[in-house]
Amino acid sequence: NADDLDDRTMTVEAEARAEEMKDIRSTFAPLAVAMLYDALDTTGMWMEQVVYDTQQQFGSASKDILVSLFETFDESVNTELLTTSQAAPGYWHKKALSLASIVAYDGHRLHETFNDYDMDKFLGSIAESHLKLNRCSNSRTFFEC
């Protein structure tokens, strides 16, 4: 019967398409996550360099200058400027760290696209981000670098 043949052909095509999409996803999802992580982490490190340079240039006045800068980029009245202001390094390290939740979320199933090597590399990067966030979010030690 011609209808049965058409149904089988469409099923085979659908299965082939699904397999291609799985291959594409497993190839490019880990790359996209790695690229986003690198962009967020690099931005955080760049902002840390801005903080360091400001401290070197302005000494004891640097805290007021940096707080003013951070407030400029955070429209909310927030006492956690070190992690909420887009001008603060902690904001970017926090965003990089949040990728772990996105990758781990079962609804997205992104964790299934990572091979062991890529997952180990990603988890190492997330651990580094956690350390960087701890360093950049404590106001007592942050301004005394």
Image: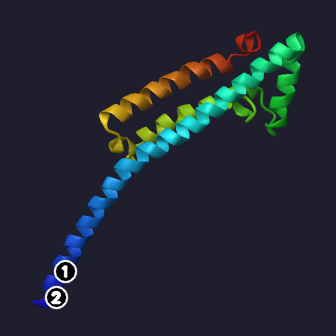
Q: Secondary structure at mark 1?
A: helix
Residue pushed farthest bottom?
A: 2
The residue indicated by pointer 1 is: 7
The percent coordinates of residue 129 (x first, y second) are 55, 25
- Please tell me whether residue 24 is drawn above or below residue 30 in the rendered image: below
Q: Quadrant of residue 81?
A: top right
In the picture provided, is 89 more to the left or to the right than 33? right
Q: Is residue 121 above or below residue 53?
A: below
In this orientation, does residue 108 appear? no
Helix, strand or loop for disc 2:
helix
Report the disc number at residue 131. none
Q: Nearer the viewer, residue 99 or 56?
A: 56
For the residues marked 2 and 1, what is the alpha-carbon distance in whole angstroms? 6 Å
The C terminus sits in image quarter: top right
Instruction: Give the left or right position of residue 124, taking residue 75 as reference.
Output: left
| Residue 101 visible in rendering | yes
Residue in the picture at 77% in, 14% down: 143
- Amino acid marked by disc 2: Asp
User: Which residue is located at x 72 percent, y 23 percent?
Assistant: 49
> Mark 2 touching mark 1, by CB under 8 A?
yes
Res 111 → quadrant: top left
Image position, residue 103 (x, y; %): 44, 40
- Residue assigned mark 2: 3
Q: Quadrant of residue 11?
A: bottom left
80 left or right, relative to 60: left
Q: Position of residue 32 (x, y in %)?
A: 48, 46
